[in-house]
Amino acid sequence: MSATDGLMRGIEVIDTGAPLSVPVGGATLGRIFNVLGEPVDNLGPVDTRTTSPIHKSAPAFIQLDTKLSIFETGIKVVDLLAPYRRGGKIGLFGGAGVGKTVLIMELINNIAKAHGGVI
């Protein structure tokens, strides 16, 4: 996947038969990627020999980790008053102008830069 300049109806395409895949494995731990699986954390290239398709079945319930741990965001108010569970789901509610987007942007910034990624 790349830029769509010049893309139009009727243009010839080639079907590779392969699904969209992203790098996986130990080399990806603690790294930050864009939606195409390219690193965006300025830590250099990633070993992409092992990849996994973006669409696949969820892990079986028995394979899930049951250990509880806190996800350190680096945002003092969040970490102190309403800590997030590592691997859990997080929802932000609020009307227009209350700072939901700012909070998410700060969270991404802290994880990518200050903490060197999720480990």
Image (tube, grey):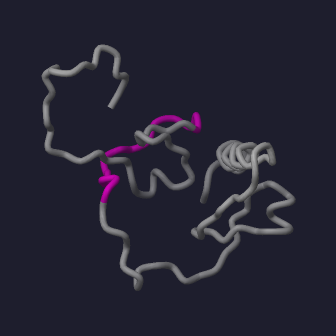
Asked if residue 114 shows in the view, the reply is: no
Q: Residue furthest front?
A: 95
* Image quadrant containing the C terminus: bottom right
Side of 39 where 67 appears, left or right: right
Q: Magenta stretch containing residue 2, yes or no?
A: no
Q: Could you tell me which residue is drawn at 45 percent across and 42 percent down?
A: 35
Q: Residue at x 78, y 46 (%)?
A: 99
Residue 58 picture quarter:
bottom left
Task: Answer left or right for 47 relative to 9.
Answer: right
Report which quarter residue 82 is drawn in. Answer: bottom right
Above or below, 31 against 80 in this view is above
Residue under the point 44% across and 38% down = 38
Look at the image and tell me whether residue 1 can be seen. Answer: yes
Q: Is residue 60 above or below residue 6?
A: below
Residue 79 at x, y percent in the picture: 80, 64
Q: Nearer the viewer, residue 39 or 6?
A: 6
Q: Residue 96 in the image: x percent, y percent?
A: 75, 45
> Which residue occupies the foreground of this view, 12 or 28?
12
Which SS does the magenta portion mostly show? loop
The residue at 68%/50% (across/down) is 111
Number of numbered discs visible in the structure rendering = 0
Tell me, yes or no, whether the highlighted magenta stretch contains residue 51. Answer: yes
Q: Position of residue 23 (x, y in %)?
A: 38, 48
In front: 8, or 116? 8
79 left or right of 5 in image: right
> Which quadrant does the N terminus fall into?
top left
- Which residues are drawn in magenta? 41-55
